[in-house]
Image (tube, rainbow, N blue to C red):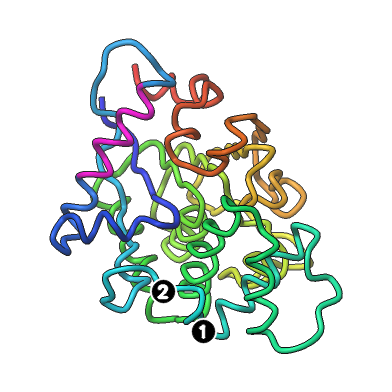
Amino acid sequence: MAAIVGVHGIGKYNYYLEAGRSAEGAARAMRLKWDRYLHAALGGEAGTYFSEIAYFSHHLHDGKDAPRSLAAMEAPAQQILLEWAKHLGMGEHVTGALKSFTGWLLTKLDGRSAAFAQLFAPEVAAYLTDQAKREKCRQVVAETIRRNRPKVVIAHSLGSVVTYEALWANPDLRVDLLITLGSPLGMRNVVFERLLPAPMNGRGERPSGVRRWVNIADKDDIAAIPPELCGSFAGVDVEELVNLDWIDFHTAEKYLACPALDPHLRPFLA
């Protein structure tokens, strides 16, 4: 049944540590979970939906046992946090040192947003500003797709950014359906302008090897700003705005269990 490659999002370094610093072990553990999550949406007989999860989180870290704390956040991550916060209506008239502002910002965010920021800003910054790490992540995704030759790729969160760039960098890769979940691809001044290839005249495009692109985002997802990608990218065939959970607004579990996936995946799971 397996016809899908998954690409994970932020905050998955713990899988690597729990697998004894094995990327393969982390990918296996994540695949089992993603199969269960997707089964909740599709119902029927439980089975293997994902052939493999492209696991890249270990490439965003420097061998530390935990993600970098916000107190130790480097300047690129602080800048990402600042620009991201502006999308939440905060920090429009910031004065003073950047580091002082980031400390202040966390006191103003609710618990879920602060916890999210501690994962989002360092990992997104590591990917977008460190070219060696960026290339390693893209290679993982490209090699996983090439090895499995899936009909469908489901990319969550930061994984949608890595997948977008990997598909553009490897035009020989062919995918019938790309599903992006909770994608920050269109987030201005954080992700969009930093994409490779760079958007032209304010517009990105669907990767040439992708036949159909479906984007699904929760209305309260603070990573998917804006939730719709059609305004920033040509070639998005379907946009679906969903209401998952006001607390678990960005988790792969909630997205993969979302009924909105069913009609798009059914033709590939017969």
Q: Disc 2 marks which residue?
A: 68
Residue 19 percent coordinates (x, y):
16, 55
Q: Secondary structure at mark 2?
A: loop
User: Which residue type carries mark 2?
Assistant: Arg
In front: 220, or 142? 220
Which residue occupies 44% across, 81% down? Answer: 131
Determine if the magenta segment contains residue 2.
Answer: no
Which residue reaches farthest right? 93
Which residue occupies 77% across, 50% down? Answer: 231
In front: 173, or 20? 20
In front: 261, or 1? 261
Compared with residue 164, is residue 35 higher up or lower down, i.e. above or below?
A: above
Q: Residue 60 lies in what quarter of the image?
A: bottom left
User: Which residue type carries mark 1?
Assistant: Glu
Which residue reaches farthest left? 20
Most common secondary structure along the magenta stretch: helix
Residue 186 percent coordinates (x, y):
68, 56
**From the viewer's perspective, is 120 left or right of 79?**
left
Determine if the magenta segment contains residue 32.
Answer: yes
Q: Disc 1 marks which residue?
A: 74
Quadrant for the C terminus, please: top left
Give the mark nearest the N terminus, 1 or 2. 2
Q: Which residues are magenta?
A: 29-39
Compared with residue 253, is residue 231 higher up or lower down, i.e. above or below?
A: below
**From the viewer's perspective, is 238 left or right of 4?**
right
Q: Residue 130 lies in what quarter of the image?
A: bottom left
Measured Cα–Cα span from mark 1 to mark 2 = 9 Å
